[in-house]
Amino acid sequence: MKQVSILMSHPILSRTIVVGMTAVALVAIRAADIPERPEKLSFPPLDFEPPDPAAHRHVLDHGVVAYLVPDPALPLVDVSILLRVGDHLDPQGREGLAGIAGGLLTSGGAGDRTAEELDEHVAYLAARLGSSISGYQGSVGINLLSKDLDEGLAILRDVLARPRFQEDKLALRKEQILAAMKQRNDDSADIESRERRFLAFGEDFWSNRFTTQSSLDAITRDDLVAFHRRWVHPKNFIIAAAGDFEVEAMKSKLNQLLADWPYTGEAATPPPGEPQMAKPGIYMVDKDVPQGRVTVMLPGIQRDDPDYFACLVMNDILGGGGFTSRLMNRIRSDEGLAYGAGSAFQAGTYSKGPFIAVFQSKSRTVPYATSIINEELDRITREPVSGEELNTAKRSFIDTFPNNFANKSAVAGLFASEELTGRFAREPDYWAKYRDRIEAVDAAAVQQVARKYLSRDQVRILVVGQHEEILKGHPDHPVKLTELSPGPLVEVPLRDPLTMEPMNPAAAESQ
């Protein structure tokens, strides 16, 4: 006691002891409040309301829609021009033109600057400048200090209205594309992705018009100039801007950016046509690799389908939810047949996309793992999902919902993309209602869409791997691949990487 009294009589030591004892007491109290299991943790309700698109939507003098989201937190500005321009606009025999044009807008020189001078100027401003066109849209964007905004917009004006498409940069890009084309059959993942597109959409669908050596050789600088003047102009622009600016001042600057455009082009149309999915069957691509890649495919939905939200929840339970999903648990955790397995509704923006379930496994266990997918397709159509599964799936969408609006640039970009694809014209309150629509999905709705879209008699199975080994199956699991689809077995030859035409077996063996 005497020693304690002496210590407590020292002013600094006494304060230290009191603080320390208080901290220990608080730790003890908090430890008592911590549940023994993670699933018993409780959190207050997430209070988040998404930003209102209408509050950030502005129509500029030239009819161009701009989403402007000010953010003074940092002295930076991010400006993106979304282009309603995509690969579907490639002329016949010039496949690959849109992609090359999109990249060279910012890498091929612009205005009075060569490509090298433009790169140096952007670096001097400590800015990021980039552009691309792929799929059904493109973009040109710059990120820089807010004090340099006028200079950045002048650069955007040059790359959008006066790109140089420098000949040496065109030649370099064509060399790079050709080198990549030669590797098209090197990776079984690339083969699977490509053949999946052909099976899902058909040989003649716009997204399956691949660049070939012939089309690449045919592309000239004159083609780039003509493509640019026809499609890259304000009629096809949507603007997204976020950062350190005043809204009215930014509107004025953007009006100046678009003023007196030097040429008149055409308004682009959406991608054409409806997909033509291959008939049910087993489609095998012979490739000498140690593991087979499998895609189980069924007809799916379009993004604006009324069943979209029920399909999201159903798929999360089936295979989209990672380690909480049935396919991952069965194929990986229970059977150890693959490192991962999953599924997705690839809902198209302008047309229907497929439902797919995918995995990769040793050749001899491919049939057994595929049979598990079929079993789970049957199960989710036959039995109502559990309340726990339903709640976990719905919470995964609702709790991560704020991630769509993670920062101001994400908000501006998301809203501009929805404007470009027409979603906001059809449904301006889409994001405001998103969580309510997820919450409204019940077990009956899940079973209803499962029965509607996961019919076993519509299964297409794509397999890339060692044909003979896969067909043998595994001695411990008497399952034959040919029993897993009502359709026939179809041997799909490898495609020539430079022509994309099917090769004969002798030529394919060298790939």
Image (cartoon, rainbow, N blue to C red):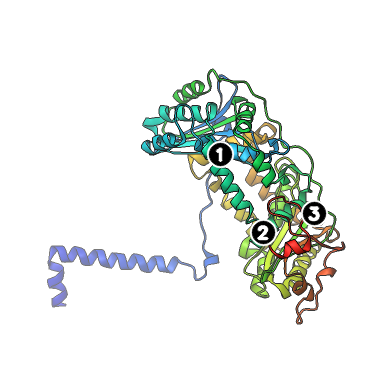
Above or below 510: residue 70? above
For image coordinates 69% across by 69% down, the residue present is 288
Residue highlighted by disc 3:
453
Above or below 277: residue 383? below
Left or right of residue 490, residue 316 in this image? left
Identity, as a three-letter code, of the amino acid under mark 2: Asn
For image coordinates 52% across by 70% down, the residue present is 37
Q: Residues within 10 Å of mark 1 (few under 14, many from 20)?
A: many
Residue 507 x/y as whole percent: 74, 61
Residue 317 x/y as whole percent: 68, 60
Q: Earlier in the sequence, mark 2 or mark 1?
A: 1
Q: Earlier in the sequence, mark 2 or mark 3?
A: 2
Residue highlighted by disc 2:
185
Identity, as a three-letter code, of the amino acid under mark 3: Tyr
User: Distance of mark 3 from mark 1, alpha carbons?
Assistant: 45 Å
Above or below 470: residue 95? above
Q: Residues within 10 Å of mark 3 (few under 14, many from 20)?
A: some
Q: Earlier in the sequence, mark 3 or mark 1?
A: 1
SS at mark 3 in the image = helix
SS at mark 1 in the image = helix
Can residue 232 be seen from the camera position used here? yes
Which labelled disc corresponds to residue 170?
1
Q: Are marks 2 and 1 in contact (CB under 8 Å)?
A: no
Residue 295 x/y as whole percent: 73, 61
> In the image as oriented, which residue stretches furthest toward the bottom?
476
Left or right of residue 286, residue 3 in this image? left
The quadrant holding residue 186 is: bottom right
